[in-house]
Image (spheres, rainbow, N blue to C red):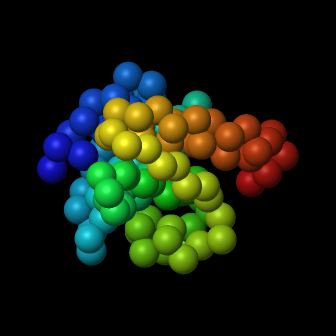
């Protein structure tokens, strides 16, 4: 559980709001990044590494890490610490939000 707590603590310093829930082997974190809701699906890899799939909420048919995992949309972040994962995940979220552009719906 330290992964989730440290990730949310670090991410909360960079975003407006962040809430989490457990879901089928993942931890789902939903946060508002630059006014856009973003999903962060956290997991633990091998050798002490962590990863997150980062997806805009609007790019999924439902709020779910299973949907995010199989979606071609979104970006992955990898790190060796939960706080490093939060930083890299936030960077990926900013990229996704910037790609959204003013004309997309």
| Picture coordinates of residue 75, whole percent (x, y) | 60, 55
Vertical side of 98 occupied by 72: above or below: below
| Picture coordinates of residue 74, whole percent (x, y) | 62, 58
Asked if residue 39 shows in the view, the reply is: no
Asked if residue 1 shows in the view, the reply is: yes
Task: Judge by depth and name the residue closer to the eye, 70 or 19.
Answer: 70
Looking at this view, name the residue that lies furthest to the top: 13
Q: How many marks?
A: 0
Q: Quadrant of residue 105?
A: bottom right
Vertical side of 97 occupied by 34: above or below: above
- Residue at x 24% of width, y 46% of height: 3
Q: Is residue 1 left or right of residue 54?
A: left
| Picture coordinates of residue 94, whole percent (x, y) | 62, 36
Looking at this view, name the residue that lies furthest to the right: 103
Task: Judge by depth and name the residue closer to the eye, 17 or 47.
Answer: 47
Q: Is residue 29 left or right of residue 4?
A: right
Vertical side of 73 occupied by 13: above or below: above
Vertical side of 69 occupied by 102: above or below: above
Q: Is residue 11 left or right of residue 33?
A: left
- Residue at x 42% of width, y 75% of height: 66
| Picture coordinates of residue 62, whole percent (x, y) | 48, 70
Looking at this view, name the residue that lies furthest to the left: 1
- Residue at x 47% of width, y 32% of height: 87
Q: Is residue 22 left or right of residue 42?
A: left
- Residue at x 25% of width, y 57% of height: 21
């Amino acid at each position: 559980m330290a992964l989730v707590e440290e990730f949310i603590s670090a991410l909360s310093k960079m975003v407006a709001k962040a809430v989490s829930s457990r879901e089928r082997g993942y931890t789902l974190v939903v946060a508002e990044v630059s006014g856009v809701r973003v999903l962060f699906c956290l997991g633990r890899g091998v050798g002490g590494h962590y990863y997150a799939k980062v997806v805009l909420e609007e790019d999924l048919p439902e709020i779910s890490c299973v949907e995010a995992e199989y979606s071609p949309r979104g970006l992955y972040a990898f790190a060796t610490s939960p706080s490093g994962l939060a930083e890299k995940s936030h960077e990926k979220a900013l990229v996704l939000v910037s790609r959204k552009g003013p004309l997309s719906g």
